Image (cartoon, helix red, strand yellow):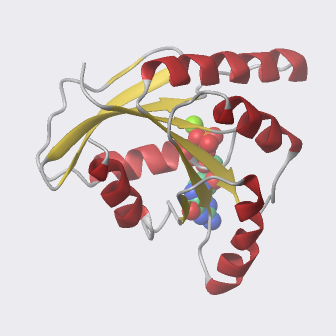
């Protein structure tokens, strides 16, 4: 139970890096809730005393591209069902891919709040490239570098405003 945020997006955009970042921000450590399932990871985040669940999706492996995409769609569906907010992660170094577009369509239909994260925005040049993602039309949109943690505070502020 409790407020739940699901991190979704195609492989390699940095979902798990962001997931670990968010858990790291906790001021108090509550570890017994976190656990690993076959294709999802659960954790608790504490931001200024507001606590919520975080789900990291996409920890599966497949060799076939068709099975792969089908699996991603399945996981997005589960994430939509289980969460109060969807954090849709994309990768500025890859630009908007077909799979991003496809996922964006599914997420728009979900009627849940979708926060777009343009990840890997590590420098000012990439900040400029990231503006391309506004075309996806998600509000709010965040430019993040999950590797350095820049931008995660703004994301957490906006999430905890909704709790
Ligand atoms: P996932 O498949 O979406 O869970 O992606 P991962 O979290 O496993 O990250 C995929 C790759 O992207 C790894 O090599 C990460 O180190 C890298 N990565 C993640 N976030 C960032 C970032 O903000 N900047 C850069 N440059 N690389 C990142
Ligand atoms: Mg991952």
Q: Which quadrant is home to the N terminus?
A: top left
Q: Position of residue 96 (x, y in %)?
A: 81, 54
- Horizontal side of residue 66 vs 114, given as left or right: right
Residue 92 seen in the figure: no
Q: Position of residue 11 (x, y in %)?
A: 70, 38
Residue 99, above or below 34 = below
The image shows a total of numbered marks equal to 0
Query: Which corner quadrant of the image does residue 29 belong to?
Result: top left
Query: Which corner quadrant of the image does residue 102 belong to?
Result: top right
Q: Position of residue 137 (x, y in %)?
A: 69, 54
- Horizontal side of residue 88 vs 161, given as left or right: right
For the point 50% across and 60% down, the residue is: 146
Q: Which quadrant is home to the C terminus?
A: top left
- 29 or 103, which is in the foreground? 103
Q: Quick check: which quadrant has ligand 2?
A: top right
- Horizontal side of residue 72 vs 6, given as left or right: right
Residue 85, above or below 40 = below
Q: Position of residue 36 (x, y in %)?
A: 40, 20
For the point 63% across and 85% down, the residue is: 124
Residue 30, above or below 71 = below
For the point 65% across and 33% down, the residue is: 107
Residue reaching furthest to the bottom: 124
For the point 73% across and 61% down, the residue is: 133
- Horizontal side of residue 34 vs 152, given as left or right: left
């Amino acid at each position: 139970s409790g407020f739940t945020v699901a991190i979704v997006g195609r492989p390699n955009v940095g979902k798990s890096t962001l997931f670990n970042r968010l858990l790291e921000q906790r001021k108090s450590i509550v570890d017994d809730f976190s656990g690993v399932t076959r294709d999802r990871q659960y954790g608790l985040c504490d931001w200024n005393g507001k606590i919520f669940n975080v789900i990291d999706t996409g920890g599966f492996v497949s060799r076939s591209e068709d099975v792969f995409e089908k699996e991603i769609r399945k996981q997005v569906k589960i994430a939509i069902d289980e969460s109060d907010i969807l954090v849709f992660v994309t990768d500025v170094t890859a630009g908007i891919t077909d799979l991003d577009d496809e996922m964006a369509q599914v997420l728009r239909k979900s009627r849940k709040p979708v926060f777009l994260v343009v990840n890997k925005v590590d420098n000012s040049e990439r900040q400029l490239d990231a503006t391309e993602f506004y075309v996806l039309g998600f509000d709010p949109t965040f430019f993040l570098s999950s590797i350095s943690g820049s931008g995660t505070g703004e994301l957490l502020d906006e999430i905890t405003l909704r709790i």
